Image (spheres, grey):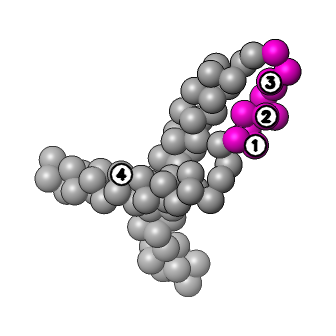
Amino acid sequence: MSSRDTRSGKLAPLWRALVEVGFIIFLFYSNLLMGEFTRSNGQGKSLVFAVKDIFTISNFGIAIFSGLVGYVVFEYLRKRI
């Protein structure tokens, strides 16, 4: 076995966690974008306006928190089933 195989074995849970949290964050922002774009799709409103409106520090904090909670819940369910 090469040292690369053992290194990837130790990092596999970390990579899986990062991918799962990242996917939850992606779903959070895509949901915000759909809601904001349809709500603000008036005269003079654009996709750029909606994107600027959703990428805030508070939304990022909520996304990180939601991603971590979602990861913990899915890990718990994965181990229970």
Is there CB contact under 8 Å for labels 2 and 1?
yes
Amino acid at the residue labelled 2 = Phe
Nearest to viewer (mark 2 / mark 4): 2
User: Which disc is residue 49 wearing?
Assistant: 2
Q: Which mark is residue 52?
A: 1
Give the residue at the far top of this rendering: 43
- In the picture of the structure, the residue carrying the numbered disc 4 is 70
Tell me whether circle 2 and circle 4 mark residues in contact (CB < 8 Å): no
The residue most toward the right is 44
- How far apart in space, not on screen, are marks 3 and 4 (Cα)? 33 Å
For label 3, the residue is 45
Three-letter amino acid code at the position of disc 1: Lys
Quick one: label 3 or label 4, which is nearer the N terminus?
Answer: 3
Q: Report helix, strand or loop for mark 1.
A: helix
Sequence-first tag of 1 and 4: 1
Distance, label 3 to label 1, CA atoms, is 11 Å
1 or 4: mark nearer the eye: 1
Gap between marks 2 and 1 measured at Cα: 5 Å
Tag 3 secondary structure: loop
